[in-house]
Amino acid sequence: MVDRQAHPVILVVEDEESYRDALSTGLSVEGFVVIGASNIAQAREFLDTANPDLVLLDVMLPDGSGLDFCRELHDTTRIPIIMVTARSSEVDVVLGLEIGAADYVTKPYRLRELIARIHAVLRRPVSLSEGEVVSFGDLRIDFVRRTVIRRSQEIELSRKEFDLLALFATRLGQVVTREVCLDTLWWGLELSDTRTLDTHVKRLRQKIEDDPANPRHLLTIRGVGFRLDA
């Protein structure tokens, strides 16, 4: 039996054999268990039998669109997906992220960077269990439906806002450092440039706090990070 904590299972969906073999070799050396699929049909079979921890998914596949398959996976499973593709325009990247990809890597890529991104995605919080929610105060966070209810009204959050709130909620009462926030949700953003993170925290406070200037739930721990309190 595979120890999934020590040896996560990665499903590589890539029709180019050279890329697939290189990824399989490189990831195996790093301790991952790698399963290769050359098309979407094979990937579906392996999803049922191997239960991978993460999917590396090419956009252009012989039997369909990787973007459509990404959307399908996002809607039916909680398996994180990293898109791996030669299409690097901003529109392609944004589309991939919006339909559910956890990250987007363009070819040619450096193996060390891809491995670092895989580790970062695997560290991200997932739904605690099927149908489970976190409730405190007047907030109810549903991880499966990705909804936040406040005083019987659904709050409209962007994808990143929800992911950030989920990161805090799965560590309720614990300090989440700025490094963890950036490493989890904004890969590649330098710690010295945290304006994006601060902007998202500010927006969250405006949506979940009665008095965003004096927050009750989402607190700043000066010099360290943030803590979500019940």
Image (spheres, rainbow, N blue to C red):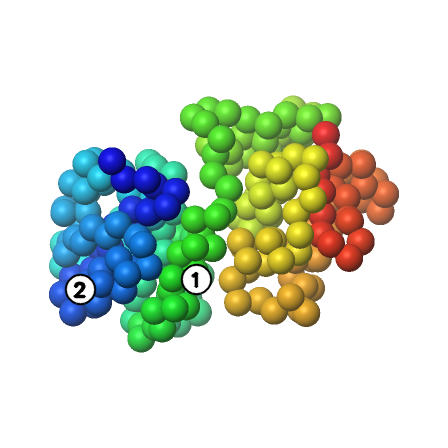
Relative depth, front residue between 4 and 162:
4
Q: What number of labels is visible?
A: 2
**Local SS, label 2:** helix
Q: Position of residue 178 (x, y in %)?
A: 66, 56
Seen at 17% across and 64% down, the residue is 21
Residue type pointed to by label 2: Asp
Residues 132 and 161: in front is: 132
Task: State the mark number for residue 21.
Answer: 2
177 displayed left or right of 56: right
Q: Earlier in the sequence, mark 1 or mark 2?
A: 2
- Disc 1 target residue: 116
Element class at badge 1: helix
Q: Residue at x 51, y 33 (%)?
A: 143
The answer to whether residue 198 is left or right of residue 123 is right
Q: Residue drawn at (49%, 47%), measured in percent from left and top?
A: 124
The percent coordinates of residue 185 (x first, y second) are 54, 55
173 left or right of 122 in image:
right
Q: Position of residue 214 (x, y in %)?
A: 85, 43
For the question of whether residue 117 can be seen, the reply is yes
**Quadrant holding the N terminus:** top left
